[in-house]
Amino acid sequence: MMPDGAGRGAMLEEAMRELEAAIHDARVSFDCIGLGEIDRAHTSAVTARIAIDAAMTAMQTALAQMPSQTPSQAPSLPAASD
């Protein structure tokens, strides 16, 4: 299930949809291997990979559309604990 998309751009929404499709296709491929349906498993693995490529393209587009951030404007990450 996808989280609420409030505040996300269209490209990130598309990336989320593509990743959901990739997850589904990967699960189908996994199940088909277990059932011995190798041709169908291969087809589902290929479509999963295509969906991931589409998600990457959408994310790259979203990143390119973001306003530039200087290092002082970038969100800080929490410090790693030992």
Image (cartoon, helix red, strand yellow):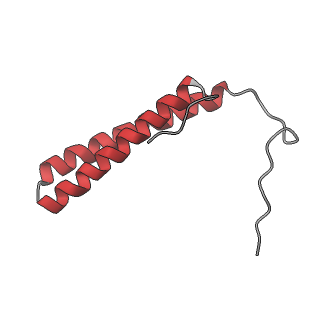
Camera-side residue: 37 or 71? 37
Q: Residue at x 65, y 24 (%)?
A: 65
In this image, 12 relative to 63: left or right? left
From the viewer's perspective, is residue 17 above or below residue 42? above
From the viewer's perspective, is residue 60 above or below residue 79? above
* Residue with the most extreme right position: 72
Percent x, y for residue 77? 77, 53
Q: Residue at x 76, y 76 (%)?
A: 82
* Residue with the most extreme bottom position: 82
Q: Is residue 52 at least partly visible in the picture?
A: no
Percent x, y for residue 35? 13, 59
Camera-side residue: 5 or 74? 5
Q: Quadrant of the N terminus?
A: top left
Total numbered labels = 0
Q: Residue at x 20, y 49 (%)?
A: 42
In this image, 23 relative to 16: left or right? left
Camera-side residue: 27 or 74? 27
Percent x, y for residue 30? 25, 56
In this image, 24 relative to 75: left or right? left
Q: Is residue 67 at least partly visible in the picture?
A: yes
**Residue 22's quadrant in the figure?**
top left
Percent x, y for residue 57? 49, 32
